[in-house]
Image (cartoon, rainbow, N blue to C red):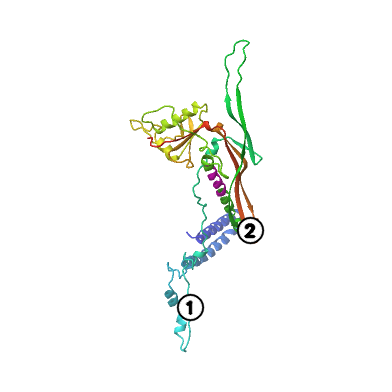
């Protein structure tokens, strides 16, 4: 039943109800009125219902045509064509254009017909591709080595360009049991005052002021890279600095050569490290750390027993680099096949005059007038190796 049929039915029901109410209230004069109203309503109800039904059908057809037109227009907008489901070629646009028909019917010549054809947008830079904004991901940075040698040493901050410390150079111990009333023996000690200059480690790069302001994250990258460069050189200097010129006097050049306290037949890498630890202990400097190249640590990690089992644990186990309870620092700053065992907390002290810092300035050449800046990173440090016997440096050589 349509909306209008329902409406007429409700109206008829309301009219009958009203007539019945009047009939009950005043039956004397309402019968005739009720009958005439009913007849009149029935005479026109059918005609009204027919016309309303026809109007409903016309509205439904009109709505369907509107929907079809909207869908065609949407397809045409999307494809840039006539709504046929694919983009029109230039030839299709030309032959379907209404202006072509008008031009062909012209009887006078010469004439000219011009058509502006539409092209399909693509990712080509000459089309819509130039409007796209690429996604910017995080910058890929070259791998950085983890620096760990500094962590083995005591670090002291200083406020001068040189450090002085007293070092004992001799001990004469004449202590002995003494009889009552006898002269007691005299012992002696010798010290010397040593002066250690601090050295500067530095480097810099030029950059334009514009790029630093336009790309803020670039400043962070430069800062990190410059600081990493300082730490990289520092680690090499701590181990192998030869003390000449502005070089540090490193741990290895001041260490004691490894000499096995006793011989082990078919000694392994682990045996060799154990003997070096013993050498330190016999020198009264119990070791607190081991430094070696990552390749040598992996050689140790891959050692197996006679049953083919890994000595330091299964491959899937997470093993903290350590031997005989001492931490192993695996760094590429140490030469391959070499090791350094030591009591690092006693052996040497690292002095920080300037902690690593990064500064920017235009005070270089003609940088000010060229809108350039010099970005400088530097640190000022000193290394004093105070106890050479606390450091044992050796060679794995052909040890398995």
Q: Is residue 234 a member of the stretch shown in magenta?
A: yes
The earlier-in-sequence mark between 1 and 2 is 1
Stretch in magenta: 225-235
- Name which quarter of the figure residue 312 lies in: top left
Q: Which residue is mark 2?
A: 365
Front-most of 269 and 134?
Answer: 269
Judged from this view, the residue extending furthest toward the bottom is 108
Q: Label 1: how many residues lie within 10 Å, few (<14), some (14-19) or many (20+)?
A: few
Q: Element type at marker 2?
A: loop
Please tell me whether residue 341 belongs to the stretch shown in magenta: no
The answer to whether 382 is drawn above or below residue 112 in the figure is: above
Asked whether the viewer can see residue 50, the reply is no
Q: Nearer the viewer, residue 187 or 211?
A: 187
Residue visible at 55% across and 49% down in the picture: 225
The location of residue 28, given as percent across then percent down, is 60, 57
Q: Is residue 187 visible?
A: yes
Q: Residues within 10 Å of mark 2 (few under 14, many from 20)?
A: few
Q: Nearer the viewer, mark 1 or mark 2?
A: 2
Residue 295 higher or lower than 67, as above or below: above
Identity of the residue furthest to the front in this view: 183
Q: Is residue 379 above or below residue 371?
A: above
Outermost residue, right side: 159
Residue nearer the viewer, 299 or 66? 299
The C terminus: image quadrant:
top left
Q: Which element type, helix, strand or loop, lies under badge 1?
A: loop
Q: Which mark is residue 115?
A: 1
Cα–Cα span, label 1 and label 2: 62 Å
Q: Residue at x 62, y 56 (%)?
A: 373
Magenta part, dominant SS: helix
What's the mark number on residue 96? none
Identify whether 28 is placed above or below 267: below
Give percent across and percent down for residue 328.
48, 35
């Amino acid at each position: 039943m349509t909306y209008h049929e329902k409406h007429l039915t409700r109206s008829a029901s309301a009219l009958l109800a009203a007539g019945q109410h009047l009939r009950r209230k005043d039956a004397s004069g309402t019968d005739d009125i009720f009958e005439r109203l009913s007849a009149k309503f029935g005479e026109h109800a059918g005609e009204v219902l027919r016309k309303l039904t026809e109007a409903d059908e016309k509205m439904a057809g009109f709505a369907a045509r509107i929907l079809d037109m909207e869908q065609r227009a949407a397809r045409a907008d999307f494809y840039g064509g006539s709504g046929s489901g694919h983009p029109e070629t230039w030839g299709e646009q030309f032959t379907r254009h209404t202006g072509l028909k008008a031009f062909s019917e012209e009887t006078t010549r010469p004439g000219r017909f011009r058509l502006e054809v539409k092209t399909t947008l693509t990712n080509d830079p000459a089309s819509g591709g130039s409007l796209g904004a690429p996604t910017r991901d995080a910058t890929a940075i070259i791998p950085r080595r983890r620096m760990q040698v500094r962590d083995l040493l005591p670090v002291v901050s200083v406020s001068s360009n040189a450090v002085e410390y007293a070092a004992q150079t001799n001990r004469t111990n004449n202590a002995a049991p003494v009889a009552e009333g006898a002269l007691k023996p005299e012992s002696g000690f010798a010290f010397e005052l040593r002066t250690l200059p601090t050295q500067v480690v530095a480097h810099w790069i030029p950059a334009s002021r514009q790029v630093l302001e336009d790309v803020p994250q670039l400043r962070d990258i430069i800062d990190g890279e410059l600081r990493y460069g300082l730490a990289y050189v520092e680690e090499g200097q701590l181990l192998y600095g030869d003390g000449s010129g502005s070089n540090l006097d490193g741990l290895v050049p001041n260490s004691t050569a490894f000499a096995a306290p006793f011989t082990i037949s078919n000694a392994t890498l682990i045996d060799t490290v154990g003997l070096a630890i013993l050498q330190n202990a016999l020198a009264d400097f119990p070791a607190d750390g081991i430094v070696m190249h990552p390749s040598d640590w992996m050689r140790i990690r891959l050692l197996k027993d006679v049953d083919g089992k890994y000595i330091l644990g299964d491959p899937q186990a997470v093993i903290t680099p350590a031997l005989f309870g001492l931490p192993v620092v695996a760094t590429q700053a140490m030469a391959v096949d070499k090791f350094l065992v030591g009591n690092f907390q006693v052996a040497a002290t690292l002095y920080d005059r300037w902690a690593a810092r990064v500064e920017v300035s235009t005070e270089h050449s003609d940088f000010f007038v060229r809108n350039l800046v010099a970005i400088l990173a530097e640190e000022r440090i000193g290394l004093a190796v105070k106890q050479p016997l606390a450091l044992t440096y050796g060679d794995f050589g052909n040890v398995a």
